[in-house]
Amino acid sequence: MARRIAVASQKGGVGKTTTVASIGVALAELGQRVLLVDLDPQACLTFSMGIDPEDLPASVHEVISGVRSASDVIVSTVEGVDLLPSTIALAQSESTLVGKSNAVFTLQRALVMIDDDYDIVLLDCPPTLGILTVNALTAAHEVLVPLQCETLAHRGVGQVVETVAEVKRVSNPDLIVLGFLPTMFDGRTTHAQVVLADIGTRYDMPVLTPPIPRSVRFAEAPALGRTVLSTSPQLRGAEVYRAHARQLVARSID
């Protein structure tokens, strides 16, 4: 059975999509069969992986709506991972799901059908704590929370923690919290170090190390439809994402 990991944050711009894409490609480099799932109507992950959302005949929206199966919509990417893409049509899924019975299990039911095709499925949640994110958390076995080491990013962490706790209570009691992944980290600043230290003591969740260092290369790569693992393979940030991929594989073996 595929191992499903949701990457969730209620704040945009914290490196969530970059984390999904980079860890996904790093896992593929390790020989894992990887599927990325874009659950954001803005389709940033889809674009970042070199797929134009406007050229797609169908997306995860049709899968959630029950019109198409996931296997019919999945596309391959040049970096060795498969993608269940998104388009702006996904914005309609909020209203579609609200009217369905057991709506929070919709994505889980769709992904179970392709479990044998992949080793790891990474779910890129939208920057909200709405029903799409709850669907991802319900479908996932584990959840990872990217955290930008700045005060404003820090302020919304409590809501993410509360949402994860509610999902564990209501729809997915076996959900495992992998922890916070510090992103855009500048170890030269006292501010980043203070935020990181505070997160580690304030919440009952582990902080994963090493943190992802800040680099403009992460912002440049999506314009090429690639990750930094191929555009800047020697970049320190690329190596750190590879280290986290190795940790994930080791954890699954354990």
Image (tube, rainbow, N blue to C red):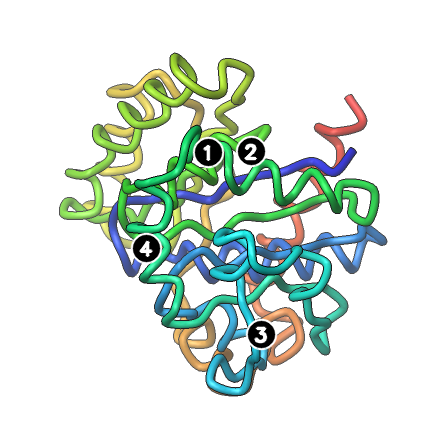
Gap in angstroms between the C-alphas marked 3 and 2 = 22 Å
Q: Which residue was labeled with disc 1? A: 137
What amino acid is at disc 1?
Leu
Q: Is tag 1's residue or tag 3's residue first in the polypeptide sequence?
A: 3
Q: Which residue was labeled with disc 3? A: 49
Residue 151 in the image: x percent, y percent? 15, 44
Gap in angstroms between the C-alphas marked 2 and 4 = 21 Å
Q: Secondary structure at mark 4?
A: loop
Q: Which residue was labeled with disc 2? A: 140
Rendered residue at 28%/47% (across/down): 149
Gap in angstroms between the C-alphas marked 2 and 1 = 5 Å
**Residue 156 numbered mark, or none:** none
Whether tag 2 and tag 4 are in contact, CB under 8 A, the answer is no
Number of other residues with Cα within 10 Å of mark 2, as a class: few under 14, some 14 to 19, many 20 or more: many
Whether tag 2 and tag 1 are in contact, CB under 8 A, the answer is yes
Rendered residue at 61%/54% (across/down): 23
Q: Nearer the viewer, mark 3 or mark 2?
A: 2
Residue 51 in which image quadrant: bottom right
What amino acid is at disc 3?
Met
Q: Secondary structure at mark 1?
A: helix
Q: Is tag 4's residue or tag 3's residue first in the polypeptide sequence?
A: 4
Q: Which residue was labeled with disc 4? A: 14
